[in-house]
Amino acid sequence: MLKKATTTDIPTIQSLAHRTWPDTFGDILSPDQIDYMLEMMYSPAAIREQMEKGHVFHLVYEAGQPQGYLSHQLDYLPGTTKVHKIYVLPEQQGKGLGKLLIRAAERFAKEAGQQTLRLDVNYQNQAIGFYEYLGFVKIGRHNTDIGNGYLMEDFIMEAKL
């Protein structure tokens, strides 16, 4: 059900991103910003670069079909694993796949001796309640200039392991 992704899975990750982002961010970001960010973060070269920098991607499957993905990085900060990306297809949400991905990230982090799991989430994203339900708390807020006049406006959330 969960598979560590390799560079051969880059097209699958890219496809899932293009299928999840419009639903996830359609009420928060402009279509132009969504397109810009998808190209910036999910071009094949961008995904490959993330993998080379230590982002580990995992795909979640159901009935043999990819339904979502997770990207995490051990020791993002000392003792802290960062969840960079977690997305599940809109039609698959509510079935426990997101929870499975977060629990997998927790397991990977614990196995590596990490004490904290961290993620950033858009301050308007409905997933905030999901993360709070799983034990994350808001520890701050920050804006990141991503170019082209766009900002990522996020809460920083952490869960102790």
Image (spheres, grey):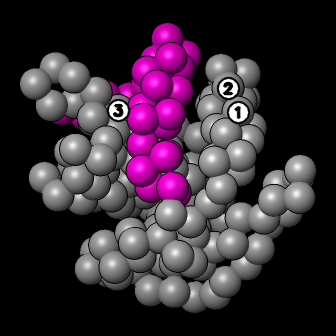
Mark 1 or mark 3, which has the lower sequence index? 1
Tell me if residue 127 comes above or below residue 94 in the rendering.
below
Q: Which residue is mark 1?
A: 39
* Amino acid under disc 3: Leu
Q: Nearer the viewer, mark 2 or mark 3?
A: 2
Q: Nearer the viewer, mark 1 or mark 3?
A: 1
Q: Is residue 17 magenta?
A: yes
Q: Quadrant of residue 7?
A: top right
Q: Which residue is mark 2?
A: 43
How many C-alpha atoms fall within 10 Å of the one at disc 2: few (<14), some, or many (≥20)? some
Quadrant that contains the N terminus: top left
Residue 159 coordinates in the image, percent (x, y)? 42, 77
Does residue 37 appear left or right of residue 148 in this picture?
left
The one nearer the camera, 39 or 9, is: 39
Q: Which residue is mark 3?
A: 59
* Amino acid under disc 1: Glu
Does residue 66 appear left or right of residue 73 in this picture?
left
Residue 59 coordinates in the image, percent (x, y)? 35, 32
Tell me if residue 82 comes above or below residue 59 in the rendering.
below
How many C-alpha atoms fall within 10 Å of the one at disc 1: few (<14), some, or many (≥20)? some
Mark 2 or mark 3, which has the lower sequence index? 2
Q: Could you say whether the residue bearing mark 2 is in a helix, strand or loop?
A: loop
Q: Residue furthest top?
A: 8
Are circles 1 and 2 on residues that touch, CB within 8 Å? Answer: yes
Residue span colored magenta: 1-26
Does residue 54 appear left or right of residue 100 in this picture?
right
Q: Is residue 140 visible?
A: yes
Q: Please name the residue shown 20% across and 45% down the image.
A: 92
Q: Could you say whether the residue bearing mark 3 is in a helix, strand or loop?
A: strand
Q: Please name the residue shown 77% across and 74% down the image.
A: 143
